Amino acid sequence: MSRVETTTNFRDSNGVDLGKKIITKDYLISVYPGIGQQIGIPPELWTWGYGTQGQLGTNTTTDKSTPVTTSAGGTNWKQVSTGRYHCAAIKTDGTLWTWGVGGLGAPGALGDNTATNKSTPVTTFAGGTNWKQVSSGGYHCVAIKTDGTLWTWGSATFGKLGTNDTTTNKSTPVTTFAGGTNWKQVSAGSQHCAAIKTDGTLWTWGDGSQGKLGDNNSTTNKSTPVTTFAGGTNWKQVSGGGQHCAAIKTDGTLWTWGRGNEGQLGDNTATNKSTPVTTSAGGTNWKQVSAGGNAGGNHCAAVLYVDYVL
């Protein structure tokens, strides 16, 4: 494990400077997110797990039980997202890269104008150096550029590309039917998507079964982005899961909707919800949430800020 020397300002109970400490790179980054580049730790890309479709980007199709670097190498990776059998990542230079399954049930999911698998990272056909955020879904990808435009590609079933079409797959990134230059954050679920605009509104599209679009219906798919039944202009972050969604508002409250048969909505029930509901934990200090699974995952996890009075 890599080690980093850093001078601290820590002092003991007598006020004596504790001086220089040796700490691990991983620990430092976990405690101080984003500090890596400030102190010269390069942002490397690592993968592990199931690799039979090339989704580890190691130029092989073998599984890895320990983290390994991708064949692309490099020390300028900024953000990464895993889908069911593919991955997508953005470098610090704004370029967008994908690898894994590009055919089979996820035609065009790599956005490289092919329907073939790739075991090493490749750039999308769209090119560009202004990609800001990307999210990989079950069989598709969604991304936002620095100009606020929203792009999708891959399988179009259920309307999950948001292009007002449910049959035409896209092997290169295309803009959604909604258009606009004010998209802020997006998340791809298994067969659906959710996104937040800069005005704080929340939008969903794709597979509407089990209420996972949050638009007060449990049967109708949407091939263009629609606002959730909850409305509002204070949505901060959203995550699409296997058959559900979770989101946080600017007031720190946590909301969920969609399939609830295994308690994944956290509302102390095992029933589906077609409109956003607050979790039974309540609270107004939720920071970040993730809805599990692109292949039907039935769980959530969230970070909660706890205030202490000293």
Image: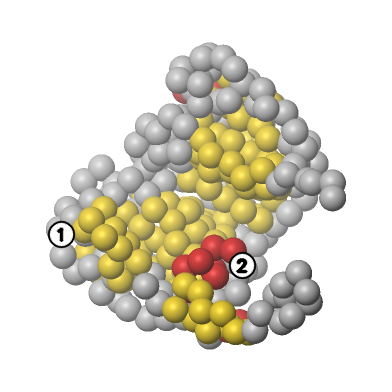
Which label sits on residue 257? none
Q: Amino acid at mark 1?
A: Thr
Task: Residue under label 2, please give it.
Answer: 32
- Neighbor class of circle 1 (other Cα within 10 Å; few <14, some 14-19, many 20+) is some
Foreground: disc 1 or disc 2: 2
Q: Amino acid at mark 2?
A: Tyr
Element marked by disc 1: loop
**Where does the image place residue 179, in percent across and percent down from the top left?**
62, 53
Relative to 221, is 167 on the left or the right?
left
Seen at 51% across and 30% down, the residue is: 244
Task: Residue under label 1, please give it.
Answer: 61
Element marked by disc 2: loop
Relative to 78, is 114 on the left or the right?
left
Give the total number of marks visible in the rendering: 2
**Where does the image place residue 170, in percent across and percent down from the top left?**
37, 52
Question: How far, Cα to Cα, is label 1 from label 2?
Answer: 34 Å
- Kindly indicate the quadrant of the structure image that contains residue 13: bottom right
Seen at 23% across and 51% down, the residue is: 50
Closer to the N terminus: mark 1 or mark 2? 2
Residue 274 visible, this angle: no
